[in-house]
Image (cartoon, rainbow, N blue to C red):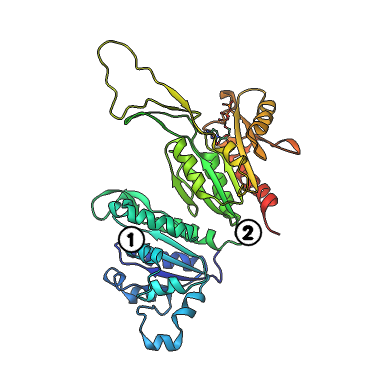
C-alpha cells in the first residue's frame, strides 16, 4: 500500500522509541523506504545500528556532520521524503516544533521541510495534560501537522492515562491515510459522533444509547478517500479510527466549542446524538439523600443546536453540511422537515424503532434526503453505508 513511498522517520528520546524499530519494519513490509533520524536523546533508548539494520539505510544523527552535508544537506534530506513521521514525539520535540526551534538535526529537518508531517506523541500523562503541551498541540494542529494517538494505558513510569504512543499498526494506518491520494485529498471534513454526557453532579450524568459506530465508520471512510478528518466525539463505546484528528469531548457545549475551533472545513457531518438538554442546576458536589424522601428537582436548559448553527454560518460555512435524523415513525416526512428547519444540505435519516435492531446494531438502512428528494438505500452493514456516503460526499465536494 505504501509502495515507493519515502518516509523520513524522526525517532525522539522516549521509552517508546523501541516501538519505532518495529514501525520501521512494518512500514518496509508495506513497501515504503524508511530513512531514520535519531535525536541524541533517542540514542539513549535505541542504537543507530539497530535502526540502520532494520531500515537497510544510513541513519542520520547530527546536524553538523560535514560528511553528510557534503552527501546530502539537511534541506534536501527533509524534502526527499514524501512524509516526515515523528515517533515518538516527545513533549520537548513538540515544543520545539510549535516554536520553530532548529537547534539539532531533527528540529532543523522539521523546519526545513515542505512535506506533510505526522507525529505520534508519547510522554508521561502529566506532561501530556500540561497546558504547555496542549497549547503546543493546538499550534501544531493549526499548522496542519497530523497527529496519531496518544493512547490511554499503563505507562512505563507506572502511571495510567493518555500519553502512551499509538500502537504500530495504528501509526501505519495514519501514514497510509496521510499519503493516500483519493478524491478528498486536501479536503478538511469535520465529523461529530457518539453521545454526549450531561452532568447532574460530579458522578452522575444524563446520556443516550448511541455507540458512535456510524460516525466512526464514516470518519474512517472519509480518511480512506484522503480527507483530513477532525473527529469530534462524545464518550462512544467504539474506539475512534486511526489516522484522524480525535477531539474527545463530553458535553454538548464542549462539542459545540470543539466544532467551532475546527473550522474552516470543506464539509461538516453531524452524526453525533447530541443531548437536547443539559441540567442547568448541576451540583458541584455529589448530591446526597437528605432523609426527607423528596427527590431533587432537576432544571433543564436547551443545548445549542450545533448543526443548525453551522448550517446558518455566513462566510466560512462548509460547502456541504450533513445532518442525521433518527426517527421512529414517518421517517421521510419528519426528516425532510428537520432538514428545512436546521438548514443543512443533506439529512441521513433512519428508522431506529427497536424492531429494526439498527440502534446499537451492525447494519443500517438509511434514506438520503437532499434538494433532489428522498433516496432510499437498501439495508447494509454500517461500514458499507459509510463508504457509500463518503463517496457521495467526495462527489459533492471533491476535486476532479
Ligand atoms: N444536533 C446538533 N446539536 C444539537 C442537537 C442535534 O448538532 N444540540 C444534530 C445531530 O447531530 C443530528 C441532527 O442534529 O445530525 C438531528 O438531531 P435530532 O436530535 O434528531 O434533532 P432534534 O432537533 O432534536 O429533533 P427531534 O428531537 O424533534 O427529533
Work out whether 254 lies above or below 393: above
Residue 44's x, y, as percent? 26, 70
Name the image quarter holding the N terminus: bottom right
Pointer 1 local density, CA inside 10 Å: few below 14, some 14–19, many at least 20: many
Label 2 environment density (alpha carbons within 10 Å; few <14, some 14–19, many ≥20): some
Tell me the distance, in whole angstroms, between the alpha carbons under discs 2 and 1. 32 Å
Taking the spot 34% from the left edge, 62% from the top edge, the residue there is 90
| Quarter of the view holding residue 185 | bottom right
Asked which quadrant contains residue 367, the reply is top right
Question: Which residue, given by chain and number where applicable, does mark 2 sit on?
Answer: 182
Q: Residue at x 37, y 53 (%)?
A: 134
Please provide percent x and percent y for residue 300.
44, 23
Nearer to me, 356 or 366: 366
Dot 2 or dot 1: first in sequence order is 1
**Could you tell me which residue is drawn at 41 percent across and 59 percent down?**
168
Quadrant containing the C terminus is bottom right
As drawn, the residue found furthest toward the right would be 372
- Foreground residue among 390 and 234: 234
In the displayed structure, would residue 161 be above or below residue 147?
Answer: above
Toward the front, the furthest residue is 314
For numbered disc 2, what is the local secondary structure?
Answer: loop
Q: Is residue 237 visible?
A: no
Q: Is residue 69 left or right of residue 260?
A: left
| Ligand 1 found in image quarter | top right
Vertical position of residue 206 compared to residue 384: above or below: above
Q: Label 1: which residue?
A: 91
Amino acid at each position: 500500500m505504501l509502495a515507493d513511498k519515502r518516509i523520513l522517520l524522526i525517532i525522539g528520546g522516549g521509552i517508546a522509541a523501541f516501538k519505532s524499530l518495529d514501525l520501521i519494519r512494518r512500514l518496509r513490509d508495506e513497501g515504503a523506504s524508511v530513512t531514520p533520524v535519531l535525536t541524541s536523546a533517542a540514542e539513549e533508548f535505541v542504537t543507530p545500528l539497530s535502526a540502520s539494520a532494520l531500515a537497510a539505510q544510513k541513519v542520520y544523527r547530527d546536524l553538523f556532520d560535514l560528511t553528510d552535508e557534503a552527501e546530502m544537506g539537511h534541506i534536501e534530506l527533509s524534502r526527499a521524503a514524501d512524509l516526515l513521521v515523528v515517533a515518538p514525539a516527545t513533549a520537548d520535540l513538540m515544543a520545539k516544533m510549535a516554536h520553530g526551534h532548529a537547534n539539532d538535526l531533527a528540529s532543523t529537518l522539521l523546519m526545513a521541510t515542505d512535506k506533510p508531517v505526522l507525529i505520534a506523541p508519547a510522554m508521561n500523562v502529566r506532561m501530556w495534560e500540561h497546558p504547555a503541551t496542549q497549547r503546543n498541540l493546538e499550534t501544531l494542529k493549526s499548522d496542519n501537522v497530523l497527529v496519531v494517538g496518544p493512547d490511554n494505558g499503563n505507562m512505563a513510569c507506572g502511571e495510567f492515562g493518555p500519553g502512551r504512543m499509538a500502537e504500530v499498526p495504528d501509526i501505519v494506518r495514519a501514514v497510509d491515510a496521510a499519503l493516500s491520494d483519493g478524491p478528498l485529498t486536501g479536503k478538511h471534513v469535520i465529523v461529530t459522533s457518539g453521545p454526549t454526557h450531561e452532568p447532574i453532579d460530579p458522578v452522575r450524568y444524563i446520556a443516550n444509547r448511541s455507540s458512535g459506530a456510524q460516525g466512526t465508520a464514516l470518519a474512517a471512510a472519509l480518511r480512506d478517500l484522503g480527507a483530513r478528518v477532525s473527529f469530534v466525539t462524545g464518550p462512544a463505546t467504539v474506539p475512534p479510527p486511526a489516522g484522524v484528528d480525535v477531539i474527545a469531548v463530553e458535553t454538548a457545549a464542549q462539542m459545540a466549542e470543539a466544532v467551532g475551533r475546527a473550522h474552516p472545513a470543506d464539509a461538516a457531518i453531524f452524526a453525533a446524538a447530541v443531548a437536547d438538554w443539559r441540567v442547568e442546576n448541576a451540583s458541584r458536589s455529589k448530591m446526597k439523600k437528605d432523609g426527607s424522601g423528596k427527590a431533587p428537582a432537576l432544571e433543564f436548559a436547551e443545548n445549542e443546536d450545533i448543526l443548525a448553527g453551522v448550517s446558518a454560518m455566513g462566510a466560512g460555512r462548509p460547502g456541504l453540511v450533513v445532518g442525521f435524523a433518527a426517527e421512529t415513525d414517518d421517517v421521510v416526512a419528519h426528516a425532510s422537515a428537520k432538514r428545512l428547519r436546521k438548514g443543512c444540505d443533506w439529512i441521513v435519516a433512519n428508522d431506529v424503532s427497536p424492531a429494526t435492531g439498527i440502534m446499537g446494531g451492525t447494519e443500517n438502512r438509511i434514506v438520503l434526503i437532499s434538494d433532489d428528494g428522498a433516496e432510499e438505500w437498501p439495508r447494509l452493514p454500517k461500514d458499507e453505508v459509510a463508504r457509500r456516503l463518503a463517496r457521495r460526499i467526495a462527489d459533492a465536494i471533491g476535486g476532479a
